[in-house]
Image (cartoon, rainbow, N blue to C red):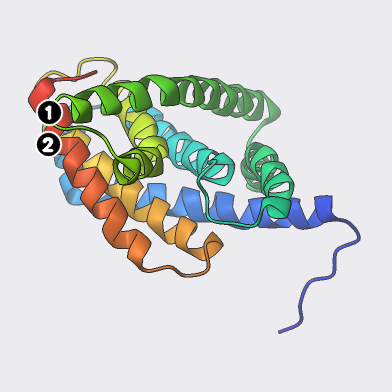
Amino acid sequence: MTTPRFDSLDQMAAATAGMLADAAAHDAFRLFRDRTFRRLAAFDSLDQGEQDRIFNELVVSWLVLVMLMLEAPDLGIDDDMRPYLGDVSKHIPKAHVGKLRELGIEDEHLRIWDKLIDMRYQEYARDRHGVRAAAMKIEAAEKELGADDFAKIQLCVPVQAVAIGCHHHVCRGRTEGRDELFKLLVRSLGRFYVEIRVRFEGGRITLLTRVRVAINRFLRRLLKHRWK
């Protein structure tokens, strides 16, 4: 195989975004096809239009998770790489919409996709602040927070913010009694998040354990306190 040649960093960023967008869409489709997910989402009672809407919400959530990960201030990369990854993040929506265009999706629907990705990105990016503050409040109620606690909270903020929003939209806001679906979303997003983040941080496998522990702690505390 030959290494692709790029005339600019922007071209390289666009190509990287394309690969990440494809990975996000494929992983979202994997969950969409999962039997447990379909049972918890009550697919048997949903018409095709509603099932399609849920699939779109999953794909958008996975795309936004990648964008938030690339922009995470605690991402373990050299500082001179941050502007480049910021450009990659900005290319993610274009990459996904471009792939849909190649598949023959009409421009009217492409504009809807573009708006949906931007809307969910703005929503989940904004929600990060509330997620972080609430997680710190819950943790601080049980013990005095140290530097490691702050680091673990920050590490999982993108997963938590996206999972809460995705759960809300998949359920159309009717989330009462649907904790198992929420847990599945958190763990599925968390697994994908680790796979992508480890690649950017040089294959640090210890990240997997850290995220698993942080996610399990988050789930226990969230469901205990019924924090929304």
Query: Which residue is labeled 1 in the image?
Result: 223
Q: Residue at x 57, y 49 (%)?
A: 21
Q: Above or below — where is 63 with respect to 8?
A: above
Q: Residue furthest bottom?
A: 1
Kindly check if marks 2 and 1 are in contact, taking CB atoms under 8 A apart as contact: yes
* Quarter of the figure with the N terminus: bottom right
Q: Amino acid at mark 1?
A: Leu
Residue 33 is situated, as x and y percent measured from the top left of the image, at 29, 50
Q: Do we see residue 84 in this rendering?
A: yes
Quarter-of-image position of residue 164: top left
Residue 47 is situated, as x and y percent measured from the top left of the image, at 28, 27
Q: Is residue 110 left or right of residue 72?
A: right
Mark drawn on residue 220: 2
Q: Residue at x 32, y 32 (%)?
A: 51
Mark drawn on residue 110: none
Q: How far apart, in angstroms, are the residues tagged by discs 2 and 1?
A: 6 Å
Q: Do we see residue 54 in this rendering?
A: no
Q: Residue at x 20, y 15 (%)?
A: 174
Q: Nearer the viewer, residue 125 or 102?
A: 125
Q: Amino acid at mark 2?
A: Arg
